[in-house]
């Protein structure tokens, strides 16, 4: 539990500094310790969105919504991921 909290806090600190790749690594380590903790998935989804990795963000949100079907952050971030995927699809069609 202590290691989980420490990793999560380190991930949160990286987010505040805009170091999204490092934050993703910390949140991913958290997930190895506890797959049911939704906040690390929604936090990692935020990082993926910042890095334009929409499919990964959507997957993390989908996972959260299987555990907590009314998680507002997961719904919101999944919507942003879908929006990003739609924009990417339109841009690819224009090439």
Image: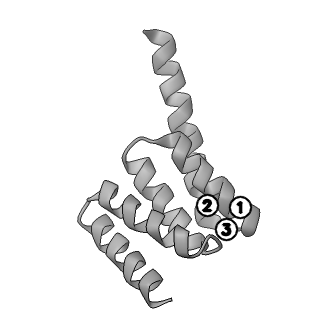
**Label pair 1/2, CB-CB below 8 angstroms:** yes
Q: Is residue 90 left or right of residue 78?
A: left
Mark 3: few, some, or many residues within 10 Å (few <14, many ≥20)? some
Q: Which residue is mark 2?
A: 74
CA gap, disc 1 and disc 3: 6 Å
Name the element at disc 1: helix
Q: Quadrant of the C terminus?
A: top left
Could you say where residue 91 lies in the image, as x and y percent from the top left? 46, 19
Q: Is residue 35 left or right of residue 44?
A: right
**Label pair 1/3, CB-CB below 8 angstroms:** yes
Depicted 82 relative to depicted 78: above or below = above
Depicted 9 relative to depicted 26: above or below = below
- For marks 1 and 3 on the same chain, the one whose residue lies earlier in the sequence: 1
Could you say where residue 62 lies in the image, as x and y percent from the top left? 67, 54
Viewer-closest of 31 and 9: 31
**Label pair 3/2, CB-CB below 8 angstroms:** yes
Mark 1: few, some, or many residues within 10 Å (few <14, many ≥20)? some
What residue is shown at x 36% (from left), y 70% (from top)? 11
Q: Which residue is mark 1?
A: 65
Residue 61 makes an appearance in the image: yes
Residue extending farthest to the front is 32
What residue is shown at x 50% (from left), y 29% (from top)? 87
């Amino acid at each position: 539990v202590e290691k989980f909290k420490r990793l999560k806090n380190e991930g949160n600190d990286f987010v505040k500094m805009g170091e999204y790749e490092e934050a993703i690594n910390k949140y991913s380590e958290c997930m190895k310790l506890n797959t049911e903790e939704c906040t690390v998935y929604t936090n990692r989804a935020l990082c993926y969105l910042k890095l334009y990795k929409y499919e990964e963000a959507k997957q993390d949100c989908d996972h959260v919504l299987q555990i907590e079907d009314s998680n507002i952050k997961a719904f919101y971030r999944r919507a942003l991921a879908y929006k990003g995927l739609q924009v990417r699809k339109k841009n690819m069609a224009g090439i």
